[in-house]
Image: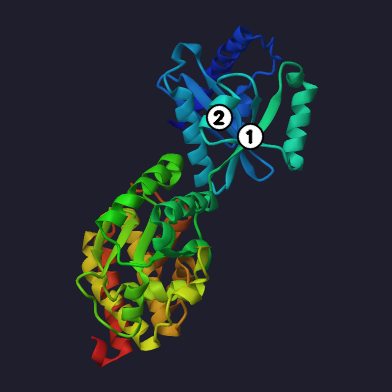
Amino acid sequence: MRAARPHELAVLPTIEAASDELFAEHGIGPLPRVVTTVDELGRAAGVLVAGDPVVGFARLEVVGGESHLEQLSVHPAAARRGVGGALVEAAAEWAALTGHDSLTLCTFADVPWNMPFYLRHGFEVVEDLGPSLHALRASERRIGLDGLGQRVVMRRRVGPEAVLADLTAGLTTALGDHLVGLYAHGSLVYGDFAPARSDLDVLAVVARPPDEAMLAAVAPVHAALVARHPAWRGRIEVETCARSTVEMYATGGHSNVSDRIMRISPGEALHLLPATPHRVVTWAGVRNRGRALAGPPAVDVLPAIGRDVVRAAFLAHVRDWPLWVEDMRTVGGQAYSVLSLCRAWCLSDSGEQLSKRAAADRAAEGLPRDAPLVTWARDWWYAGGGDDEPDRHAEVQDFVRRTSLKILHDAGPATG
């Protein structure tokens, strides 16, 4: 599945016309002669195609602030090969990556490859239509589509809230009484969420330290989640920790052998790992600003963590960044490293926990020597930078090393 190339648009009306002929086999027709034109395709919000040469396409528009699947056509010669389903999933991914919460469509209720097909792909019939979808349905009635069969409007949720809802339902069932609370945090909650780039960050607090049995229980939840929401594959971070582990670190205690956490994150499969003081910074942020997805508010579940404990954990995190950046070999990893150190510098300099964008803006002013690199990282992250951009690892590594040393130096000799 890919975006259509300009020269391929001319063949798509022919594919649509051939696909429409199948309706006659089910007693529907003749369909109104309203074939998509090349000019319309050129002005569409998005056109995705399958095959080379093309055998199917999906035309996407924006209707009432929602992504809308205006047309899905597969040439009869390529039917029953999964092309239509793959195009639907690609359309849902397009909708999510362009920042929309849902994908809508209008279709026939009684045609096997219409409503029943879309139900299998996660769509639901919508009764309560907004003004824009009402207008679209009125247009369909004017051209005579309603006289050929029952028409329905359908919607599939594709945005971060849909992912969090499915994740919450899955983990609540899988963890049962072990789940104490589930909390969203990170950029979706704190600000500057980038639909095409940002991760979804979740903390699960459980009644006992995670173990192999708990990992086995939640693994199917994550597998089902990425199958249903492919746009979010590799962009969901869920950390699971016992409340007792947080309580121990909150008082400056040290980990026991049994104090493990469980995590799945970008670049990491679901796994168990030792609890470390680094996690205190995240836990404190969730307690103060996390959004409850299940269970009581975070402030009622997580203990208060002393400022000195958080500060020590933060500085330990900063101290380790020069080691971590050595493995940041992708352009995206390098941009992330720069933005992470910008956030750390802002927290050290002013005590403010800022979003990546806000921290980059502040650092570009406060660290003039590094302003070009900081601006590049911000723009790569928020303006759709590509992985084929030139490697900047040496420059990024130098920035991380110098900024880390500056933060540790400014914090005082006891932390260096």
Q: Is residue 191 visible?
A: no
Q: In this view, does 321 lie to the left or right of 197?
A: left
Look at the numbered disc 1 and give the secondary structure of its residue: strand
Mark 2 belongs to which amino acid?
Tyr
Give the quarter of the image for residue 28. top right
Which quadrant of the rendered structure holds the C terminus?
bottom left
Q: Which mark is residue 242?
A: none
Which residue is rendered at x = 52% and y = 52% of the image? 165
Q: Is residue 351 left or right of residue 402?
A: right
* Of the image marks 2 and 1, the number of the one nearer the N terminus: 2
Mark 1 belongs to which amino acid?
Met
Residue 310 in percent (x, y) is at 36, 82
Residue 134 in percent (x, y) is at 76, 36
369 and 312: which is toward the camera:
312
Circles 2, 1 touching at the beta carbon (< 8 Å): yes
Residue 401 in percent (x, y) is at 25, 73
Give the quarter of the image for residue 407. bottom left
Task: Examine the rendered structure and indicate whether residue 94 appears above or below residue 184.
Answer: above
Q: Name the residue under label 2.
A: 118
Task: Examine the rendered structure and indicate whether residue 22 appears above or below residue 91.
Answer: above
Q: Which colour scheme is used?
A: rainbow
**10 Å neighbourhood of mark 1: few (<14), some, or many (≥20)?**
many
Q: Name the residue under label 1.
A: 154
Look at the numbered disc 2 and give the secondary structure of its residue: helix
Task: Examine the rendered structure and indicate whether residue 395 appears above or below residue 49.
Answer: below
Which quadrant of the rendered structure holds the N terminus?
top left
Q: Can residue 204 be seen in this view?
A: yes
Which residue is rendered at x = 26% and y = 73% of the image? 276
Which residue is rendered at x = 31% and y = 56% of the image? 214
For marks 2 and 1, give the CA distance: 8 Å
